[in-house]
Amino acid sequence: AEMKYCAVCGLPPDFCQYGPSWEKCKPWCMEHAPEYYPELSGVSLEDAKKSADAAAEKGKEKMLPGGKKKRDKSPGITIKKLSRGGRKCVTSVAGVESFGVK
């Protein structure tokens, strides 16, 4: 049997509704896998495409695999203690540039 996968989210079409981007997947599912979603037969394809476009605009923020949103890393200073052989150590301080310190 040939397995079909959604072109939008990559899930099998019967799992699309549980995926991270169901609004965007709806039109694809209505066109390519209507047998899984008989309740969508009343909804017009145009309406679904419009809502998918709206969802695409809204979802422009970076999405990581699994539907997690990528957030900007907050500025921070990292301090590491590196051993230099024997009992000697070097302290490495990184990230101070973002606070205006040279």
Image: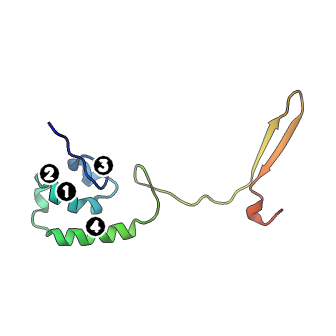
Query: What residue appears at the point 85 percent right and 33 percent down from the top-left corner?
Result: 84
Mark 1 and mark 3 residues within 8 Å of each other at the beta carbon: no
Q: CA distance from mark 3 to mark 4?
A: 16 Å
Asked if the residue under mark 1 is in contact with the one under mark 2, i.e. CB atoms within 8 Å, the reply is: yes
Dot 1, crowdedness within 10 Å: few (<14), some or many (≥20)?
many
> Residue 16 versus residue 9: which sits nearer the camera?
9
In the rendered image, the quadrant that contains the C terminus is bottom right
Q: Residues within 10 Å of mark 2 (few under 14, many from 20)?
A: some
> Disc 2 on helix, strand or loop?
helix
Where's residue 9, x and y in %?
31, 53
Q: Which residue is mark 3?
A: 10
Horizontal side of residue 35 vs 20, given as left or right: left
Mark positioned earlier in the residue sequence (2 or 1): 1
Label 4 or label 2, whichever lies nearer to me, is 4
**Label 2, label 1: how many angstroms apart (C-alpha)?**
8 Å
**Image position of 12 with respect to 26: above or below:** above
Q: Which residue is mark 4?
A: 52
Tell which residue pokes out farthest to the top in this image. Answer: 86
The residue at the point 40 percent across, 53 percent down is: 67
Mark 3 / mark 4, whichever is N-terminal? 3
Q: Which residue is mark 2?
A: 36
**Crowd rating for badge 3 (residues with CA inside 10 Å; few <14, some 14–19, many 20+):** few
Dot 3 falls on a residue whose secondary structure is loop
Q: Amino acid at mark 2?
A: Tyr
Q: Which residue is mark 1?
A: 29
Mark 4 burial class by Cα count in 10 Å: few <14, some 14-19, many 20+:
many
Question: Do the numbered discs 3 and 4 sit on residues whose CB atoms are within 8 Å?
Answer: no
C-alpha gap between disc 3 and disc 2: 16 Å
Residue 76 rendering spot, x and y as whole percentages? 70, 56
In this rendering, is residue 17 above or below 84? below
Q: Residue at x 28, y 63 (%)?
A: 23
